[in-house]
Image (cartoon, rainbow, N blue to C red):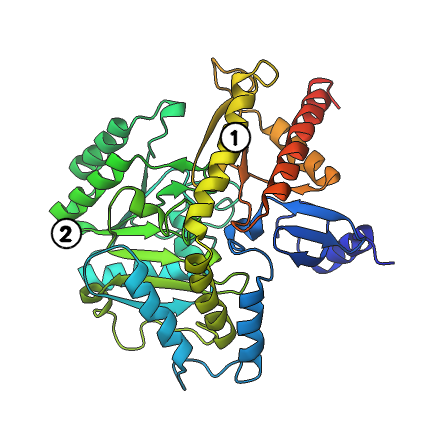
């Protein structure tokens, strides 16, 4: 029988250590919110491939669409010989992305590629060079995306020099003493002392910071950013890569604020497990892209387009926006109950929108000192007990829960029970110095 240990040894010999590794577990089979490794062990999935499998693993409709597409064509490259499904996906996104104005879309393969292209488009459309992003942000690992990312380790260390004319400002996180007003004051001070706003092409913002710790941007903050961008001719660029496609209880998280961005980048949940990303923007902005300025050999692959059409239909037909809200309500109710009880004083804050929920762990609720060692112990203990969990946060002290939106509620309850047991065991292990 193949073992996880054997595959781990093969990985170490074949793959550079710089490709991060969360667990030494190799998955052989998946179905909805369940996974089985090569040794036959079953796991409840509270990670969803980092918010990719919003519609669950191998949703029957996605599988059927892709299987049918396999019998037709798998690749031509849209720029050379186009196909209808690419156009269909773009039409649907133009309709669904927030904003009461004409839009245009093109497809790429990854979230980082979408971010890179959004920056190119903003410069081409405005004739400006500078960008503003926020501390704690994650926008990807390619050069511009890495520069926009607001976390040094492990994303930037050793990879400089980075792209010039990219500036980071504090993201409003009241739990850590950064108010919305302080963030806006920092932006005003930046415009007055560092870079004239007439030189800024765009402001990149995640409506909920993902890798940064699942911190939702205040509604009034996003609305004020919109006003500031309008005042200075700056493009507001929303990174909906992790928040998109029903994850937060809206199709897009920006809808919680009633704000429309000039450019929206998407990936992850759009493909239901197949690699696809998109850039959607105001038509007058997108039409300023020079001929041949965007494109990619594999972008908008026919199989991924077929999967995306199925995903968008599933979200509507199965009312996954409502389900995301119900999953999130159940998770937060349980986690907040733990927080309010006497057993888990290490829970500093429970937060999230829809089914994008996080627990922040601290040594002490008064000092709010991060406790990343505990979180590492929780995620590894949970895996031993059959639950896949991910961490996040600048300090690595946040457990993020990203279940498939289609998860059966008995599996959700099973996963919650494992998480509670894992938290107890991890606390005992860490406090005993093991």
Question: At 52% across and 17% down in the image, what residue appears?
Answer: 340
Please state the horizontal and vertical placement of residue 84, each as a whole percent of the image.
39, 80
Badge 2 marks a residue whose secondary structure is loop
Query: For the residue carrying disc 2, how many other residues have a C-alpha within 10 Å: few (<14), some (14-19), or many (20+)?
Result: some
- Image quarter (top left, top right, bottom left or bottom right) of the N terminus: bottom right
When the figure is inspected, residue 83 is found, relative to residue 112, above or below; the finding is below
Which of pointers 2 and 1 lies earlier in the amino acid sequence?
2
Total numbered badges shown on the rendered structure:
2
* Residue at the spot of label 2: 233
Residue nearest the viewer, comparing 408 with 204: 408
Residue nearest the viewer, comparing 146 with 412: 412
Whether residue 394 is visible here, answered yes or no, is no
When the figure is inspected, residue 134 is found, relative to residue 72, above or below; the finding is above
Whether residue 165 is visible here, answered yes or no, is yes
Question: At 78% across and 58% down in the image, what residue appears?
Answer: 10
Query: For the residue carrying disc 1, how many other residues have a C-alpha within 10 Å: few (<14), some (14-19), or many (20+)?
Result: many
Badge 1 marks a residue whose secondary structure is strand
When the figure is inspected, residue 118 is found, relative to residue 46, above or below; the finding is below
* Residue at the spot of label 1: 359
Residue nearest the viewer, comparing 181 with 240: 240
Please state the horizontal and vertical placement of residue 136, each as a whole percent of the image.
42, 38
Residue 8 as seen in the image, left or right of residue 154: right
């Amino acid at each position: 029988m193949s073992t996880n240990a054997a595959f781990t040894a093969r990985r170490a010999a074949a793959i550079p250590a710089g490709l991060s590794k969360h667990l030494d577990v190799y998955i052989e089979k998946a179905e909805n919110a369940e996974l089985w490794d090569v040794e036959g062990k079953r796991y409840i999935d509270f990670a969803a491939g980092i918010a990719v499998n919003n519609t669950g693993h191998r949703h029957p409709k996605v599988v059927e669409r892709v299987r049918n597409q396999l019998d037709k064509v798998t690749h031509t490259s849209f720029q050379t010989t186009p196909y209808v499904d690419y156009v269909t996906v773009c039409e649907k996104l133009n309709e669904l992305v927030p904003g009461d104005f004409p839009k245009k879309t093109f497809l790429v393969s990854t979230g980082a590629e979408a971010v890179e292209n959004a920056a190119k488009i903003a410069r081409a459309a405005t004739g400006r060079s500078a960008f503003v992003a926020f501390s704690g942000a994650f926008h990807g690992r390619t050069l511009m995306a890495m520069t926009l990312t607001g976390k040094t380790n492990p994303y930037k260390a050793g990879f400089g020099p980075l792209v010039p004319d990219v500036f980071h400002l504090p993201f409003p996180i009241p739990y850590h003493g950064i108010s919305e007003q302080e963030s806006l004051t920092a932006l005003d001070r930046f415009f007055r002392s560092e870079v004239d706003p007439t030189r800024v092409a765009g402001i990149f913002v995640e409506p909920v910071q993902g890798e940064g710790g699942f911190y939702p941007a205040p509604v009034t903050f996003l609305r004020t950013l919109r006003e500031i961008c309008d005042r200075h001719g700056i493009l507001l660029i929303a990174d909906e890569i992790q928040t998109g496609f029903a994850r937060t209880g809206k199709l897009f998280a920006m809808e919680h604020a009633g704000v429309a961005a000039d450019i929206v980048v998407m990936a992850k949940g759009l493909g239901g497990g197949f690699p696809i990303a998109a850039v959607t923007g105001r038509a007058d902005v997108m039409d300023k892209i020079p001929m041949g300025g965007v494109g990619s050999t594999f972008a908008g692959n026919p199989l991924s387009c077929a999967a995306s059409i199925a995903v968008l239909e599933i979200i509507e037909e199965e009312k996954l926006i409502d389900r995301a809200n119900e999953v999130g309500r159940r998770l937060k109710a349980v986690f907040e109950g733990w927080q309010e009880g006497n057993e888990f004083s290490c829970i500093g804050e429970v937060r999230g929108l829809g089914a994008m929920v996080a627990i922040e762990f601290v040594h002490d609720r008064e000092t709010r000192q991060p406790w990343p060692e505990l979180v590492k112990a929780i995620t590894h203990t949970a895996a031993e007990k059959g639950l896949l969990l991910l961490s996040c946060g600048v300090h690595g002290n946040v457990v993020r829960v990203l279940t498939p939106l289609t998860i059966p509620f008995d599996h959700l309850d099973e996963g919650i029970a494992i998480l509670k047991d894992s938290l107890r065991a991890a606390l005992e292990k860490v406090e005993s110095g093991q």
